Amino acid sequence: MKQGGTAVSYAASVATTRKAAPGRVRIAIQKSGRLTDNTLALLGRCGYRYSRGRDDLVCFGENMPVDLLLVRDDDIPGLVAENVCDLGVVGQNVLAEKNHMLARDGRALPVEVRPLRYGHCRLSLAAPREEQFGAVNNLNGKRIATSYPEILGQFLNDVGADASIVELSGAVELAPRLGRADLVCDLVSTGGTLAANGLTEVLCLMQSEAWLVRAPSRHDDPTCRDWMTRLLQRLDGVMQVDESKYIMLHAPGDALNRITSLLPGSETPTVVPLSGNDDKVAVHAVCRENVFWETLENLKAAGASSVLVLPVEKMLL
Ligand code: PRT
Ligand code: ZN
């Protein structure tokens, strides 16, 4: 659907109604933040084309009955848990935090579908550099600033540490300098922000990456169910392709077994005769794992020659 009168009124209805328009799948993604570009790029690689609503709340699928609801990442688990959106893309850190709350309220949780291999970070405890932080029991009596009070609370409970949680919605890393906390529990990627604030990472509570999640209830519209299945299949294909390579090589007949055993993640290589050469065969294989220089060197050492490694563009499994 193009931008215009119809799209704008539809945008308003998509954003305000609890159910997606009939026959359309609704996906909640981060409106503007660290996950946005990768998520849109991934959907683009699945063949999804969209136009943006004028109010910037919704993207309308032009070639699929799939719309994107653009929201803050913190709202995504709730929107998916309540079946307002059929799918969502969110960091595991946010998902875990919100799941604690949903579970406490006795509500259904979003169902985890698959990791998406971007948005990697970790939620870690960090202390001022000058402090010698040893064991977990050093947390007793400490104040810890975080935007993740549920995950931190669960951790403190699990390790039996008697620390207090100072809940902050942002600029957590400043809390020790401002005298508001002794430690922080915050997201870390490169560690540059912690270092710039005189903090050292002391303990990782969880690793995180972006995940695709789905609503707990099955969609009642068969067309939507069908599109969700197709989208997930394409997603699987796209992600598989990232790691896959097509290898072609020549192998001496007596080294065939050794050579095929060296092909990473390849189940059934195709072996074809070479015209005018009875000693060698051609081997073609899709390798579903990374092919490193070491793999090629090992293949060569085992007798392979004319080794070609090609990218795979699309794959439907
Ligand atoms: O507005 P909205 O609520 O949607 O966005 P947000 O500000 O809450 O989230 P955003 O866009 O910052 O991050 C979205 C998600 O990206 C997070 O929930 C994580 O799942 C993931 N992610 C990956 C990160 C980082 N890496 C990351 N480095 N989220 C935050 N950071 C912060 C980090 O805490 C530090 O302050 O980025 C800063 C730089 O990190 P360093 O370690 O590289 O210096
Ligand atoms: Zn957020």
Image (tube, rainbow, N blue to C red):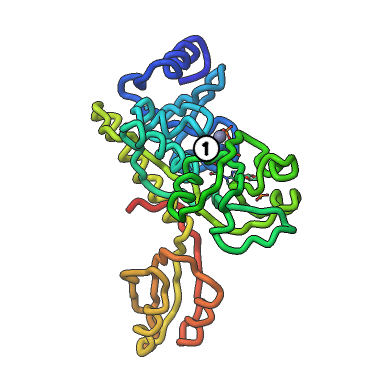
* Quarter of the displayed picture in which ligand 2 can be seen: top right
Residue that appears at 25% across and 33% down: 218
Q: Is residue 132 above or below residue 292?
A: above
Q: Nearer the viewer, residue 149 or 118?
A: 149
Q: Quadrant of the N terminus?
A: top left
Q: Amino acid at mark 1?
A: Leu
* Within-10-Å neighbours for mark 1: few <14, some 14–19, many 20+: some
Residue 137 sits in which quadrant?
Answer: bottom right
Q: Nearer the viewer, residue 222 or 111?
A: 111
| Residue 52 horizontal side relative to residue 25, left or right | right
Q: How many marks?
A: 1
Q: Nearer the viewer, residue 240 or 167?
A: 167
How far across and how far down the image is residue 143, in percent?
A: 61, 45
Q: Nearer the viewer, residue 30 or 182?
A: 182
Q: Is residue 151 visible?
A: yes
How far across and how far down the image is residue 87, in percent?
A: 38, 35
Seen as rendered, the residue at the extreme front is 141
How far across and how far down the image is residue 313, in percent?
A: 46, 53
Residue that appears at 44% across and 47% down: 154
Q: Is residue 176 above or below residue 107?
A: below
Circle 1 SS class: helix
Q: Is residue 121 visible?
A: no
Q: Is mark 1 within 8 Å of ligand 1?
A: no
| Residue 260 horizontal side relative to residue 34, left or right | left
Residue that appears at 38% across and 45% down: 234
Q: Is residue 283 above or below residue 246?
A: below
Residue 107 sits in which quadrant?
Answer: top left
Q: Is residue 76 above or below residue 18?
A: below
| Residue 180 horizontal side relative to residue 263, left or right | right
Question: Residue tagged by mark 1?
Answer: 40
How far across and how far down the image is residue 101, in percent?
A: 41, 35
